[in-house]
Image (spheres, rainbow, N blue to C red):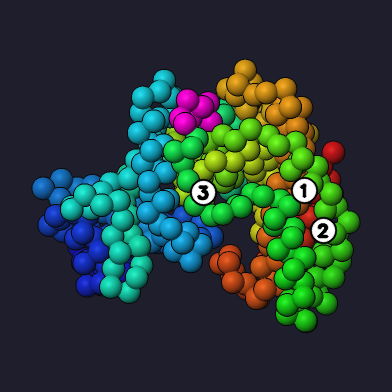
Amino acid sequence: MRAFVQNGSPYMESIIHQFFDYQQLVSLTPFGTGHINDTYRLEIVEAGKPQIWLLQRLNHHVFQQPETVMQNIHLVAEHLATQPYPLQILAPRPTRSGQWLYCDESGSYWRVFPFFENTETYERVETPAQAFEAASAFGAFAKALNGLDVSHLRPTIPSFHDGEKRLADFLAMLQNAIPERLDEARAEVDAILHNQLIFKKIGDLKLPSRAIHHDTKINNLLFDASTHRAACVIDLDTVMPGIVLSDFGDLVRTSVSLADEDEADLSKVEFRQPIYQALLEGFLSEMGELLTTVERNALPEAGPWLTLMQAVRFIGDYLAGDVYYKVKYPKHNLVRGRNQLALFEQMP
Ligand code: GN1
Ligand code: MG
């Protein structure tokens, strides 16, 4: 069996030992497409039983208070378990000594989650029915968290979806941008500046604080591989106080376009109205009666607001030298930013 083990180094084995008293490491393979953390599918034999888990290294440069992240996730999982919640719950598995995280000698933070078998993820939405299913799943998640006292959740990344703060940081960093990259991204910077008012407009609404997921991209949802129904909301690192436009906005940003955010061919970036309509109906089918009038009236602004914010983040990272997002080639963040701006321009 050892021949199939990837990364089954003594280093990795010592980490796995913090969580499991296992007899055999069957396989350890990189998993998923996240931009921030490193994720592995882990197959072991423990107490004579074969089992599969998700092992993850939490990026502590992005999440500078790893314990806060895990405390929020734990609170959310605990609360969901008390609710009439139709989906599976992503509850962390503690170390053998009862901690949510293991910090190794090199300072990396590790954690373990259940691996949901017979599930799949989608990088893009193909049909309105899928869009409805995804939006109602994230809506059900928000609805089930409505009764959780939001003051118990703490920010894991300060000002994460504060559009005005993101814009202010972007403007400030233009002074320190890598000069060649600034030349290259001139048109994109101008487009951001031209449309910047949307951040103030949304900020001025002073929408109520809720328990918000903040990363409702379609690939943060597991679907049942047989029924194609939503099975589990994953990636809970950014669950923290926020506004409802973040969750609906990221659904719109990641679902309405035919092309995903990495697509360099902008002719493929297209706003699909039937998908948008299905997202709105799906989200409202769960959250409709909980929204205030101001929240409800602001929902159409969620997509453009969040998409422009994502463009600010990608272009900002390009200008800073790719310090935040994982990139596969030198202009990756610029390509992503252009893609998001093209999508923003198409939004009604
Ligand atoms: C990051 O790692 P991933 O792909 O789940 C980011 C989101 C962005 C997204 C863009 C903590 O999420 O905010 O929308 O990339 N997460 C963090 O693809 O910054
Ligand atoms: Mg994520």
Name the foreground residue: 262 vs 306. 306
Residue at disc 3, secondary structure: loop
Amino acid type assigned to the residue bearing label 1 in the image: Phe
Please tell me in which quadrant of the rendered image residue 214 appears. top right
> Could you tell whether 48 is left or right of 76 in the image?
left
Amino acid type assigned to the residue bearing label 2 in the image: Ile
In this view, the residue farthest toward the top is: 289
Q: Residue at x 69, y 57 (%)?
A: 166
Residue holding disc 1: 199
Residue 95 visible (yes or no): yes
Does ligand 1 reach within 8 Å of label 2's beta carbon?
no
User: Which callout, 1 or 2, points to the residue nearer the camera?
Assistant: 1
> Could you tell whether 267 is left or right of 14 in the image?
right
The main secondary structure of the magenta stretch is loop
Name the foreground residue: 342 vs 102. 102
Q: Residue at x 74, y 68 (%)?
A: 172
> Could you tell whether 203 is left or right of 322 in the image?
right
Which numbered disc flags the more N-terminal residue, 1 or 2?
Answer: 2
Q: Residue at x 51, y 57 (%)?
A: 34
Which numbered disc flags the more N-terminal residue, 1 or 3?
Answer: 3
Residue holding disc 3: 155
User: Do the numbered discs 3 and 2 sit on residues whose CB atoms are within 8 Å?
Assistant: no
Q: Separation of disc 1 and disc 2 at Cα? A: 11 Å
Which numbered disc flags the more N-terminal residue, 3 or 2?
Answer: 3
Q: Quadrant of the N terminus?
A: bottom left
> Could you tell whether 152 is left or right of 296 in the image?
left
In the rendered image of this protein, does residue 289 appear above or below residue 78? above
Label 3 crowd bin: few (<14), some (14–19), many (20+), radius 10 Å: some
Residue 37 visible (yes or no): no
Q: Separation of disc 3 and disc 2 at Cα? A: 26 Å
